[in-house]
Amino acid sequence: MSPKHTRGRRPRIVFVEPAETQVRVLTTAQAVRLDDALNLLAAAPDEVKPHATASALRDYQHDGVRVIFYATALGSILIVTYVEVD
């Protein structure tokens, strides 16, 4: 499949174990804010700035939500490594 055929698809979001643990302790309100942030990330993951210590990682921070993630080579999966919601 050519890249132009995959542009409209949103990537699948996968959490590694530490991020899963962080998500499990969020309140309902925090989880809703995280979901909103993940929807934005899925729409345009390449627009998020690289993490300061590793260029493959992306560091999204907005409105008290922080998500550190990286995307697979074709952008079909976002792998979340860290989650923080104030």
Image (spheres, rainbow, N blue to C red):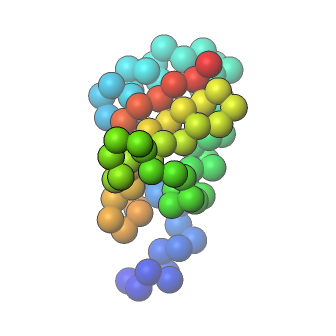
Q: Nearer the viewer, residue 67 or 15?
A: 67
The quarter in which the N terminus is drawn is bottom left
Q: Residue at x 41, y 42 (%)?
A: 52
Q: Residue at x 38, y 20 (%)?
A: 21
Q: Quadrant of residue 80?
A: top left
Question: What x and y, as percent, mark residue 63?
Answer: 69, 32
Q: Quadrant of residue 28?
A: top right
Q: Is residue 62 visible?
A: yes
Question: What x and y, as percent, mark residue 43?
Answer: 60, 58
59 horizontally vs 20: left or right? right
4 horizontally vs 20: left or right? right
Instruction: Check the image and report above or below for 32 versus 70.
Output: above
Q: Check the image and name the residue furthest to the front.
A: 52
Q: Residue at x 48, y 74 (%)?
A: 6
Question: What x and y, as percent, mark residue 13?
Answer: 44, 47
Instruction: Check the image and report above or below for 53 versus 5.
Output: above
Q: Is residue 14 visible?
A: no
Instruction: Check the image and report above or below for 27 versus 70.
Output: above
The quarter in which the C terminus is drawn is top right
Q: How many marks?
A: 0
Q: Quadrant of residue 8?
A: bottom right
Question: What x and y, as percent, mark residue 38?
Answer: 57, 43
